[in-house]
């Protein structure tokens, strides 16, 4: 039975779509009102669409949706499907005589799993993107879902996780699709690197190992996957604080600390790790609050990574 996550921020919806034959999927984050956004990439092998326009010096700083997908470069088609659905809803930047929905996206590599990748002339990802966003709701399933349906880490199944915190009345949540080259577990134990940041036993309450394992600092990676483009962990941080593109960018940079708290090794040449940050609200923000959001965004990212893997491991055990 999949755990579900209730979104604490009004106007934010999330939907999944999966293809079991191909062993892949897509996740769409839909914003009922255009949201300020930024992105920061720290992995060595990213696959993205419309991320450059989110740089603070460019003209477009708001998005209608963000799409995460499996499928490597093929999965970038998923954003086109989400864009088609948004166009049907009349969403997007008004540029006479049309509206242009803005849907940045990023992909992870799940092409070495046991799914059938002989799909014919065109990949299924455009339709998966359309299906995912059309199913977007204020709650969504965790574990082996959406973009992480066919994912894996060095030592565990991959998973789609989420976490939330509230700091001085400001909500901060994170969604993570985990397909890391490295491991979320310490050595060959069942203890998560993110254990110090866990809340309410959300990934098993296992704490840190004692004594510390002798292989705790030995980097583990997927067999044969030390090459570029074969892994990747993706995250979306969403807050109801009023951010500018520049402050969102700063939080995206800081949020990558959460990857380092939850995965080892991380940000490798074989990962396309990135974080989107979006502002889906107008709560006022000062310099002190900005620092707090950055600190806690990294924590919720770490928790989301560990919880996604934990939920996928539970599914595997139950099966």
Image (cartoon, rainbow, N blue to C red):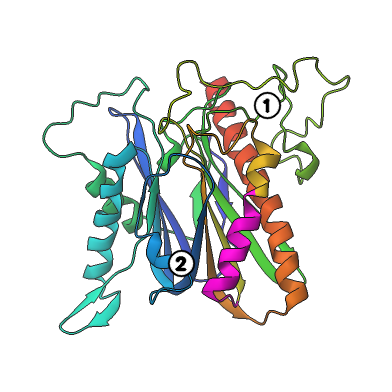
Residue depicted at 82% across the width and 24% down the height: 209
| In-image side of 89 versus 241 (left or right) | left
Residue located farthest toward the bottom when viewing the structure as drawn: 96
| In-image side of 100 versus 201 (left or right) | left
Q: Main secondary structure of the magenta part?
A: helix
Mark 1 and mark 2: span between their CA atoms? 34 Å
Q: Position of residue 236 (x, y in %)?
A: 52, 55
Residue depicted at 29% across the width and 29% down the height: 22
Which callout, 1 or 2, points to the residue nearer the camera?
2
Per the image, label 2 sits on a secondary structure element best described as: loop
* Bounds of the magenta segment: 242-256
| In-image side of 186 versus 319 (left or right) | right
Q: Position of residue 207 (x, y in %)?
A: 81, 32
Label 2: few (<14), some (14–19) or many (≥20) C-alpha neighbours in 10 Å: some
Task: State which quadrant residue 279 falls in.
Answer: bottom right
Residue depicted at 12% across the width and 31% down the height: 120
Q: Position of residue 78 (x, y in %)?
A: 29, 49
Q: Position of residue 129 (x, y in %)?
A: 30, 51
| In-image side of 228 versus 166 (left or right) | left
Task: State which quadrant residue 3 falls in.
Answer: top right
Residue located farthest toward the left when viewing the structure as drawn: 121
- Using the rendered image of the protein, determine whether residue 169 is visible from the camera's viewpoint: no
Seen in the picture, residue 45 relative to 279 is either above or below; the reply is: above
The circle drawn on residue 114 is none
Sooner in the amino-acid sequence: mark 1 or mark 2: 2
Q: Nearer the viewer, residue 136 or 228?
A: 228
- 249 in magenta: yes
Residue identifier under label 1: 185
Per the image, label 1 sits on a secondary structure element best described as: loop
- Using the rendered image of the protein, determine whether residue 12 is visible from the camera's viewpoint: yes
Residue identifier under label 2: 55
- 210 in magenta: no
């Amino acid at each position: 039975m999949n755990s579900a996550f209730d979104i604490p921020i009004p106007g934010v919806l999330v939907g999944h779509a999966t293809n079991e034959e191909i062993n892949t999927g897509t996740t769409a984050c839909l914003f009922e009102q255009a949201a300020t956004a930024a992105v920061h990439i720290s992995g060595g092998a990213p696959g993205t669409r419309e991320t450059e326009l989110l740089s603070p010096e460019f003209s477009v700083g708001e998005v209608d949706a963000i799409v995460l997908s499996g499928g490597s470069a093929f999965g970038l088609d998923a954003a086109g499907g989400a864009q088609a659905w948004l166009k049907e809803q009349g969403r997007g930047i008004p540029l006479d005589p049309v509206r242009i929905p803005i849907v940045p996206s990023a992909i992870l590599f799940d092409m070495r799993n046991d799914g059938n990748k002989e799909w014919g002339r065109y990949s299924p990802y455009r339709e998966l993107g359309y299906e995912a966003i059309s199913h977007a709701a204020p709650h969504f399933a965790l574990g082996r879902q959406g973009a992480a349906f066919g994912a894996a880490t060095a030592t565990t199944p991959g998973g789609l996780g989420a976490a939330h915190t509230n700091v001085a009345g400001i909500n901060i949540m994170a969604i993570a699709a985990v397909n890391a080259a490295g491991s979320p577990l310490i050595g060959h134990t069942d203890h998560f690197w993110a254990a110090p940041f866990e809340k309410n036993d959300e990934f098993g309450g296992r704490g840190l190992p004692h004594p510390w394992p002798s292989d705790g600092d030995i980097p583990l990676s997927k067999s044969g996957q030390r090459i570029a483009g074969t892994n990747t962990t993706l995250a979306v941080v969403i807050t109801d604080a009023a951010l500018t593109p520049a402050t969102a960018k700063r939080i995206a940079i800081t949020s990558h600390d959460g990857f380092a708290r939850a995965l080892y090794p991380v940000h490798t040449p074989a990962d396309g790790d990135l974080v989107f940050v979006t502002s889906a609200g107008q709560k006022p923000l000062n310099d002190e609050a900005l620092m707090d959001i950055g600190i806690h965004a990294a924590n919720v990212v770490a928790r989301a990574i560990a919880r996604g893997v934990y939920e996928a491991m539970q599914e595997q055990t139950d099966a």
